Amino acid sequence: MSAVAAIVRRELRAYFVTPVAYVFMVIFLVLSGVLTFYTGDFYDRGLADLQPFFDMHPWLYLVLVPAVTMSMWAEERASGTLELLLSLPVSISQAVLGKFLAAWGFIGICLALTFPIWVTVNYLGQPDNGVIVSGYIGSWLMAGAFLAIGACMSTATRSQVIAFILTASLCFVLLLVGQPQVLDFFQDALPPKLIGAMGQLSIVRHANAIARGVLDLRDLVYFGAMIVAWLGAAVLVLDLKRTR
Amino acid sequence: MIETERLTRCYGPLVAVDSLTLRAEPGQVVGLLGPNGAGKSTAMRMIAGFLTPTAGTARVCGHDIRREPLAAKRALGYLPEGAPSYAEMTVREFLTFMVRVRGLDRDVALRRFDEVVMRLELEDVLEAPIGTLSKGLRRRVGLAQAILHDPPVLMLDEPTDGLDPNQKHSVRMLIDAMARERTILISTHLLEEVHALCNRVAIIANGKLLADATPAELEARSRYHGAVSFSAQGSGVSREMLARIPGVSMTEVDPLDGRVTVFPKPGQPILEEVQALLREQNLLVTEIQLEQGRLDEVFRQITTQPRGGNA
């Protein structure tokens, strides 16, 4: 396990040595603030909660997460360090896990830095802080799922641009698939069972369920399965590329 | 110890490494010698675990790279071609990362760290980001990383590429000093390096092992082996007279500097006879040399043979 820890440390450090981390943080914090107050009707709703804040997160992640993950493996391949990494006594799964945990930790730090909005809402009223905590957990889990998708896409291509676009597209599909408009659109074409299954795939539905303050096992399983499956696919792709 | 067993790697229809069977023992410095694109790096990448062999396998210290990859990698220090490293990290951070990721014992690691930094003269650049270093320094950082855990097997892909003559010399001294109990496999296309370092040479071309011998054995295959070359003042000795010496097969005169090379028939010593003739003719010989054989010539001869040929 020390190998995974070493990789997490290295990756996290790499984020903060380059301007990537700071640019990401500033944009994330500014956008999450601005969107909450302007588009999210934070004041006008007259409710002391962070619902509008969390509602914006999927759309922020849609753009920002692929930016974090696009260089994850593509850059290792381009600079030749992948050869170094894979010749170390580290299994591919350990390397994938280490890089993923570092990125997830980084998003966690970004989320933690949004604390002023939590302070604000507590100053303005008496929100249910339990619900807010689970909102953060839901948001973080959603980021994890997106990151896992991005990690997989980054292993599949040498080009960072392609990795970005593929990740963003896949995440977009997962965001859209549960929207009522989309489900309505397919209402006539597909059997109701399939429509139900499509709805279950929706990442927003599961994140919202957690954000309401209900930590349902099914939602946790959904995110766990997403992360494990996509990281597993990343391991497979990396292993496959060794043979080609 | 490194053993490869019919190690093969294909890229589509191209066979990059073709049934390579090779063995390097502790105490040996084996040079993988071959033209560019011969399959040297591909072979090393498979042994290092970066590429999966299409067929065959390799063992590092008895650990099969397919069945026990982690044990094999633990026994191995590897410098990939071009010495890649994380450009944004400082030398200290990079080497510390290597210590951690290899899970080295803290006290041992600290001692090794200082030793390796001193050996490769990296003290002054420890806090510099690797991306800002010169090519030579980056190569030394790569070497430091490879020997940090004191591995029994070292595999260095073109270790002196891009170094100046002084740095080349110090890297060769380093490899030489480590060679005693270790197995070292280096790839190179520099013949001088083979002379300076290796006690065995494996020549590969088109992915095939074409020769596996000591440098001296290879030199003996050269037509220059045992030849006598000299420079003499005056009108020179006639080629007919030299050709009349028993054991001489032919003579050549360099059109530029008039240096004469006398080639023996295989296995026949001719130095004394040539010297005697020169004395007889009362020539002022400014320089005379018994040739050991020329590796570059043997190399060319072996690697440019038609495919399928075997030396």
Image (spheres, rainbow, N blue to C red):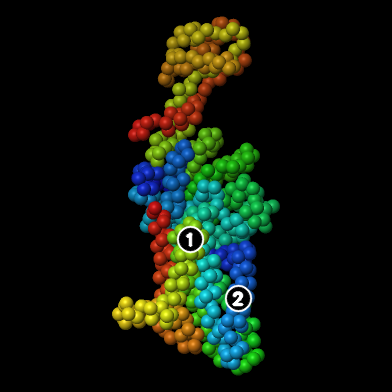
Q: Position of residue A43 (x, y in %)?
A: 61, 88
Q: Residue furthest left?
A: A191
Task: Rate crowding at label 1 as few (under 14), some (14 to 19) or many (20 or more) other CA atoms within 10 Å.
Answer: some
Q: Residue at x 62, y 93 (%)?
A: A125
Q: Position of residue B216 (x, y in %)?
A: 47, 30
State whether residue B43 appears in this view.
Answer: yes
Q: For the residues labelled 1 and 2, say whether their Cβ atoms are less than 8 Å apart.
A: no
Along the horizontal axis of the image, is A114 left or right of A84?
Answer: right
Query: Which residue is identified by label 2?
Result: A31
Q: Residue at x 53, y 36 (%)?
A: B190
Where, by quadrant of the figure, is residue A38 drawn?
bottom right
Task: Rate crowding at label 2 as few (under 14), some (14 to 19) or many (20 or more) other CA atoms within 10 Å.
Answer: some
Q: Residue at x 36, y 34 (%)?
A: B307
Q: Residue furthest bottom?
A: A126
Q: Position of residue A200 (x, y in %)?
A: 39, 80
Q: Residue at x 61, y 85 (%)?
A: A118
Spatial CA span between label 1 and label 2: 25 Å
Helix or strand or loop: what does disc 1 sit on? helix
Helix or strand or loop: what does disc 2 sit on? helix
Mark found first going from the N terminus, 1 or 2: 2
State whether residue B219 appears in this view.
Answer: no
Q: Residue furthest right?
A: B124
Tally of numbered tags:
2
Give me the disc on residue A162. 1
In this view, the residue in front, A73 or A157, is: A157
Q: Position of residue A178 (x, y in %)?
A: 42, 79
